[in-house]
Structures are given as C-alpha cells and as structure tokens.
Image (tube, rainbow, N blue to C red):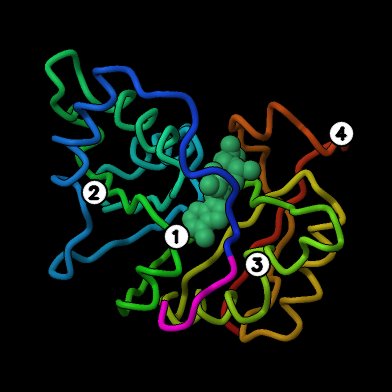
Amino acid sequence: MEKQEIRTFGRRHGKKLSIRKSLLMKNVLPKIAPTESEHIDILEIGFGAGEHIREISNANPNKIILGAEPFENGVAALLSAICDENNNIMGGYKNIRIWPDDVRLILNKNNFQFAEIWILHPDPWPKAKHEKRRLLNAEFLNMLATNLDPNGKIIIGTDHWEYFDWITEQVKNSNLVISDSEHKTIQTRYQKKNMAHTDKTKYMILTHK
Ligand SMILES: C[S@@+](CC[C@H](N)C(=O)[O-])C[C@H]1O[C@@H](n2cnc3c(N)ncnc32)[C@H](O)[C@@H]1O
C-alpha cells in the first residue's frame, strides 16, 4: 500500500495462541509464504478460520491457492487444521499459501492473474460512520479486476443484505459486472453465526466487463 489505507478489519489478535499454534506460526507459516516465481490460481480474501480455503484446496489438488487473513488466530486455526501431529503440512493441503496480512498489500506489489477470487462474509461495518471501512468499494473492486485473468470470476457471499446492495452499487462504478447471483450456500464460521439475522446468504459472481 503506497498510501495509508483505511483499516477494513477488526482485531489482529484474539486470545493467546496455544504452544502448538505459536510453533506453527513461527515454523510453518514462513514456509508457505507466496513467492513471485509461483503462479497462483485462486485467492480467498479474509478466510477467517479457513473452512472454505480447505474445501477449495481439496477440490483443486493441482491448483495453488492463496489465502489472505490479517487475524492471527484465524491464520493459526488454519495452520492447525492443515498440519499433522508432527507439524508437517498434510499431503492434500500442500497447495495452500498464506499471506497473514491485509490483502491490499500483496495485490499492490504483484501482478497476479487469478482464475477465481473468493470473498465470503466480508466485514459489513454496519454503522454509517464506519462505511469507509468497507473493503468492497469500487476502488478495491478495480484492484481485483487488474489481478483477475480475462475469464476469471470473483465470488462474493454475504448474509448482510444492506452490504450486498451497497456492493452492487459499487460494482456499477467498477470495471466488473455481475454475471450471476446463484450459488449454493457455502458453510463457514460466519455463515453459521448469521449475525445479520437474514434468511440466507446472497451471492454475486463478478467477471470483467
Ligand atoms: C466476517 S469475517 C468472515 C471470515 C470467513 N470468510 C467466514 O465466512 O467465516 C471477515 C474476515 O475478513 C478479514 N479481512 C478484513 N479486511 C481484510 C483485508 N483487507 N485483507 C484480508 N482480510 C481481511 C477479517 O480479518 C475477517 O477475518
């Protein structure tokens, strides 16, 4: 980030990590950092505790998947789920890379060509005074567009319908279009919490204009 971006996430740290998770953060995380020489196929932004990135990993054994998440406990939860008792990454999960920080920092530095970008339950920042913290504004959508391959798609899901409508307006001012709004419900920690108390998660699939 050249300029100081407005922070779009809440806490970076939660409860103290267990000894195992601290060791994973110290020893395993650096080994699965994304590198410039490796092509990355799929990005998940804000993977939370990592349920969905593990699903993508299982479904796409020949693809490399990058997850971005600045919340330390979320990163540690994912590491814990993909490592065995000897702290080695389990076979099927060797295609996961982790960026433990604001996704905008890595998107600004690189020129990716993702085939898919996933954003599930982005922080809705429901109070009007916090609207500026919403990640999925037109400027960010354009940043995603420059990192999306010509046939790529961005899948966004949220149970916060007001944020959904707000994103829909932002898309109109971006280089992307909504090409579909049908998607099966994807179960994640936030999807289960349904903090917005709505009937369902709404989805939109974005592609290049
Ligand atoms: C409401 S949670 C949803 C987590 C998960 N996707 C789920 O559905 O359970 C939103 C997540 O987005 C992350 N986040 C917010 N701003 C971000 C940013 N600029 N880059 C990467 N992740 C971000 C937060 O740390 C948080 O974990």
**Disc 4 packing (10 Å; few <14; some 14–19; many ≥20):** few
Question: In the rendered image, which residue does mark 1 sit on?
Answer: 102
Mark with earlier residue (4, 1): 1
Question: In the rendered image, which residue does mark 3 sit on?
Answer: 136
Mark with earlier residue (3, 4): 3
Q: For numbered disc 4, what is the local secondary structure? A: loop
Horizontally, residue 160 falls left or right of residue 47, namely right
Q: Residue at x 48, y 38 (%)?
A: 52
What amino acid does circle 4 point to?
Answer: His
Mark with earlier residue (2, 3): 2
Mark with earlier residue (4, 2): 2
State which region is magenta.
Answer: 1-6
Question: In the rendered image, which residue does mark 4 sit on?
Answer: 197
Marks 1 and 3 sit apart, C-alpha to C-alpha, by: 13 Å
Q: Residue at x 47, y 24 (%)?
A: 15
Question: In the rendered image, is residue 118 in sight?
Answer: no
Question: In the rendered image, which residue does mark 2 sit on?
Answer: 62
Mark with earlier residue (1, 3): 1
- Confirm or deny contact between disc 2 and disc 1 (CB under 8 A): no
**SS majority, magenta:** loop
User: Cβ of disc 1 within 8 Å of ligand 1?
Assistant: yes
Q: Residue at x 53, y 67 (%)?
A: 153
Q: Residue at x 18, y 36 (%)?
A: 26
What amino acid does circle 2 point to?
Answer: Asn
Marks 4 and 1 sit apart, C-alpha to C-alpha, by: 27 Å
Return the x and y of residue 207 as percentages of the image width and height: 58, 74
Q: For numbered disc 2, what is the local secondary structure? A: loop
Marks 2 and 1 sit apart, C-alpha to C-alpha, by: 26 Å
**Disc 2 packing (10 Å; few <14; some 14–19; many ≥20):** few
Residue nearest the observer in this picture, 35 or 123: 123
Kindly report which numbered mark, 2 or 1, lies closer to the viewer in this rendering.
1
What amino acid does circle 3 point to?
Answer: Leu
